[in-house]
Image (cartoon, rainbow, N blue to C red):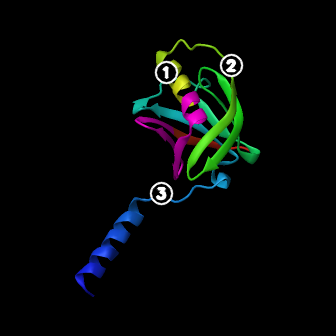
């Protein structure tokens, strides 16, 4: 094998290790997740006030942080958008959750990159990241 072929092969192997497999709606539907961190800071909300994100039939998305929200989700190229997104308009006593509430709404309306590894769901947009853990299967 010549040097060019070896370099090309190594580059392909390296790049394939970095790429994320395309996520399907089926992998998300009928699952409820609890938020565990916002931009690396752990969430300290007590049960049952823990923020949640639920994926229902046909990618209907619902959940709560400070506010309850829901809408029709679209998943394309591992980017999740929810349009239109409906939400209540209340404040939390916890400033971290207030920030997270506004961040999640913006991420879902503009589109958040989604990755799912084992039971960890990550939403990323720019420098912001929300990490959720699988709580339960939903029928």
Magenta part of the chain: 105-131
Label 3 vs label 1: CA separation?
28 Å
Label 3 vs label 2: CA separation?
34 Å
* Place of residue 96 in the rendered image (x, y in percent of width and height, measured from the top left): 47, 20
Q: Residue 107 appears in which quarter of the rendering?
A: top right
From the viewer's side, name the closer residue of 124 and 63.
Answer: 124
From the viewer's side, name the closer residue of 70 and 3.
Answer: 3
How crowded pointer 3 is (Cα within 10 Å; few <14, some 14-19, many 20+) is rated as few
> Which mark, by number, is residue 88?
2
Label 2 with label 1: CB-CB less than 8 Å: no
Label 2 vs label 1: CA separation?
15 Å
* Place of residue 72 in the rendered image (x, y in percent of width and height, measured from the top left): 72, 39
Quadrant of the drawing holding the C terminus: top right
Q: Residue 133 appears in which quarter of the rendering?
A: top right
How crowded pointer 2 is (Cα within 10 Å; few <14, some 14-19, many 20+) is rated as few
> Which mark, by number, is residue 20?
3
Badge 3 or badge 2: first in the primary sequence: 3
Label 3 sits on a secondary structure element that is loop
Label 1 sits on a secondary structure element that is helix
What residue is at 51 percent from the left and 49 percent from the top? 115
Badge 3 or badge 1: first in the primary sequence: 3
* Place of residue 118 in the rendered image (x, y in percent of width and height, measured from the top left): 52, 53
């Amino acid at each position: 094998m010549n040097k060019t072929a070896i370099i090309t092969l190594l580059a392909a192997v390296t790049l394939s290790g970095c790429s994320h497999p395309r996520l399907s709606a089926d992998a998300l539907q009928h699952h409820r997740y609890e938020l565990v961190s916002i931009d690396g800071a752990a969430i300290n909300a007590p049960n049952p006030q823990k923020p949640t994100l639920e994926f229902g039939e046909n990618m209907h998305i619902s959940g709560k942080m400070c506010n309850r929200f829901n809408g029709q989700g679209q998943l394309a190229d591992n980017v999740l958008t929810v349009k239109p997104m409906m939400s209540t308009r209340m404040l939390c006593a916890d400033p971290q959750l207030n920030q997270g509430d506004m961040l999640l709404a913006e991420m879902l309306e503009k589109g958040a990159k989604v990755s799912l590894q084992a039971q960890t769901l990550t939403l990323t947009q720019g420098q912001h990241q929300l990490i959720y853990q699988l709580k339960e299967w939903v029928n």
